[in-house]
Amino acid sequence: MTAAKQRHAIGIDLGGTTIKYALISDCGEFLFEGIADTPATEGAEAVLKALCRVADECVAEAANRGISVEGIGIGTPGIISPDGQSVLGGAENIEGWENVNVGARLTAHTGLFTLLGNDANLMALGETLYGAAAGAEDVVFLTVGTGIGGGVLIGGNLQGGWQGRGMELGHVVLVAGGERCACGAVGCLEHYASTSALVRRYAERKGIAPEQTNGRQIVAHYHEGEPEAIATLEEHWEWLGQGIRSFINIFAPQKVVVGGGISEAGEFYFEGLRRHTAANVMDVCGAHTEIVAALLGNQAGSLGAAGIIFQRKA
Ligand SMILES: [Zn+2]
């Protein structure tokens, strides 16, 4: 019997401030990794050059090790064309990152097949292939930070809606006629249940400016028994929990994976979140759903990016 041959891909996670890149095996092992600044204010050409440079580094490292690379997966903010080659738009944190054929450029430069995915979607895939939802096929992933992003897998496959334009999980309606969200609509989950919302609501209770506090401090005050911190976190769990309840009733996922800085607060955070979510979930939908913490931290994006390459011929 011969051992199955290991496969390798380059996984790149393009963010508004940094580019994380790695040479990754199909077991999810990082053979080489690096981080570079994103020239986010210098236009698309500068970002493309930076992507080619980090890909070159990975290709050279693979050559040193005698490894053949199957392709390059890239997670990027924004909406991706249905063929997985171009960023169509919606990536406000990178200047000029609109109608850019990233795939053709990287393939011309490296000779490697290249595929793009939305960053939050690829984090969801990373957690499903290698992290908190490993072994599950039906998964809802949420990343809770300044905003709320996410992804949905059904039968092990990422869902995107028509031309990949959907899955804006942070912008489902939580409060009809509610406050204005950054997206321009009112009452969105993100506006009420992001970490920014937690900080904003706590600051209102304390009569301070939001800049004077942060999520970490609020969690510390919660553990000290401060009434304002307890009230704010209970409210956060209630709001995020109501959003998650809707996702459970729609998708009946095996796992709801929650990532982002706040998810690292500890098990108490998930106990609170489960308590507030479970109350109104329909039994038939949620009986087999577990709400769990993301496991991969800032490696989820690169792992998911490599994962779209491995999924091609798997
Ligand atoms: Zn919104």
Image (cartoon, helix red, strand yellow):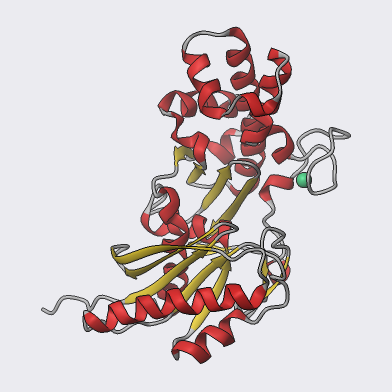
Task: Please name the residue shown 61% across and 34% down the image.
Answer: 195
Residue extending furthest right? Answer: 177
Coordinates of residue 308 in the picture (x, y in percent):
47, 71
Q: Quadrant of the C terminus?
A: bottom left
Relative vertical location of residue 274 with respect to residue 137 in this rendering, above or below: above
Task: Please name the residue shown 63% across and 41% down the image.
Answer: 146
Q: Nearer the viewer, residue 248 or 225?
A: 225
Coordinates of residue 131 in the picture (x, y in percent):
38, 51
Coordinates of residue 186 in the picture (x, y in percent):
85, 40
Q: Nearer the viewer, residue 302 or 129?
A: 302
Relative vertical location of residue 93 with respect to residue 284 in this rendering, above or below: below
Residue extending furthest left? Answer: 1
Task: Please name the residue shown 23% across and 79% down the image.
Answer: 5
Q: How many marks?
A: 0
Residue 66 sits in quarter: bottom left
Q: Nearer the viewer, residue 269 or 158?
A: 269
Relative placement, left or right, of 295 versus 102 is left
Q: Quadrant of the N terminus?
A: bottom left
Ligand 1: give its quadrant.
top right
Residue 23 sits in quarter: bottom left
Relative placement, left or right, of 17 versus 311 is right
Residue extending furthest front? Answer: 42
Coordinates of residue 154 in the picture (x, y in percent):
54, 59
Relative placement, left or right, of 262 versus 166 is left
Relative vertical location of residue 125 with respect to residue 169 in this rendering, above or below: below
Relative vertical location of residue 258 with respect to residue 109 in this rendering, above or below: above
Residue 193 sits in quarter: top right
